[in-house]
């Protein structure tokens, strides 16, 4: 049964979000609820809808013990959060193109001829794309899903903290993943914060925007 969200107030979700570094360790997020959060986060857009993001949810004590040496500067988040979600970009994401487009046809989202046209057009392009070009694409797409995940978590009443400071060279192998295929994007700690966090100053629109 789907849990009712704490809020659907988008203004509250966006403006109430803080990067929380200390959580109530007694609060646990069930895998059923985490599945809901990830499913909704995965509604984020991606290049030709290939959804190249992959999630490693580290919620067990054993998993956190593996992660701690890799994220020693963020040990509070690892130790006290309900979970740490490691987001990876799948460089072989086109392997799922047939399933994605085929299911779109089955559900009536796309005509079969459009599916065939898309696959015929993109298959040779993805066969020739360089690793660096693919990495740029999956990093961009995974950044979109990461932000959406943090906002969805907020709507469920949970707090998060995006973490870039960890050992990206070793994390895939430590958790038994193919490091040549899966590119680490970021970690996101999630749980119930022990405080509301701190507001932060944001540059005015006039500073960050150019009109043309």
Image: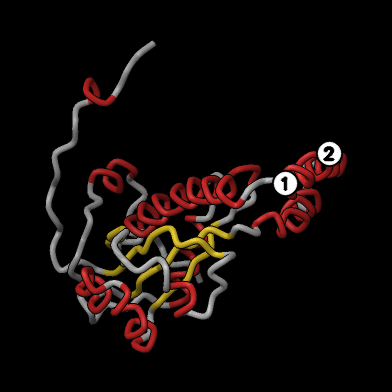
Secondary structure beneath disc 1? helix
Q: Residue at x 81, y 44 (%)?
A: 115
Contact (CB < 8 A) between labels 2 and 1? no
Is 70 situated left or right of 91 in this image?
Answer: left
Q: Residue furthest bottom?
A: 62
Point out residue 207 in the picture as x, y percentages from the top left corner: 22, 23
What is the crowding at mark 1: few (fewer than 14 residues within 10 Å), some, or many (at least 20)?
Answer: few
Is 22 situated left or right of 135 in this image?
Answer: left
Disc 2/disc 1 C-alpha distance (Å): 18 Å
In the rendered structure, which disc, 2 or 1, sits on the residue that comes first in sequence?
Answer: 2
Secondary structure beneath disc 2? helix
**Image: 111 above or below 68:** above
Q: Mark 2 or mark 1: which is in front? A: 1
- Which residue is under mark 1? 128
Point out residue 124 in the picture as x, y percentages from the top left corner: 79, 44
Is 134 situated left or right of 170 in this image?
Answer: right
Locate residue 111: give its quadrant: top right
| 25 vs 108, nearest the viewer | 25
**Image: 187 above or below 127:** below
Is 42 situated left or right of 70 in this image?
Answer: right
- Which residue is under mark 2? 117
Locate residue 109: give its quadrant: top right
**Image: 175 above or below 129:** below
């Amino acid at each position: 049964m789907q849990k009712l969200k704490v809020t659907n107030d988008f203004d509250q979700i966006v403006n109430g979000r803080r990067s929380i570094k200390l959580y109530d360790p007694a609060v646990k997020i069930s895998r059923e609820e985490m599945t809901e959060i990830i499913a909704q986060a995965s509604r984020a857009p991606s290049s030709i809808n290939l959804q190249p993001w992959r999630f490693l949810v580290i919620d067990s004590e054993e998993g956190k013990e593996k992660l701690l040496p890799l994220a020693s500067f963020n040990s509070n988040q690892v130790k006290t959060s309900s979970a740490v979600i490691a987001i990876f970009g799948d460089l072989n994401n086109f392997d799922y193109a047939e399933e994605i487009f085929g299911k779109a046809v089955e559900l009536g989202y796309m005509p079969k001829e459009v599916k065939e046209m898309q696959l015929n057009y993109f298959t040779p392009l993805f066969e020739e794309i360089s690793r660096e070009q693919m990495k740029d694409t999956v990093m961009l797409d995974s950044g979109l899903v990461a932000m959406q995940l943090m906002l969805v978590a907020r709507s469920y009443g949970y707090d998060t903290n995006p973490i870039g400071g960890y050992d990206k060279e070793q994390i895939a192998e430590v958790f038994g993943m193919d490091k040549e295929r899966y590119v680490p994007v970021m970690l996101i700690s999630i749980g119930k914060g022990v405080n509301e966090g701190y507001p932060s100053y944001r540059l005015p629109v006039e500073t960050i925007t150019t009109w043309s």
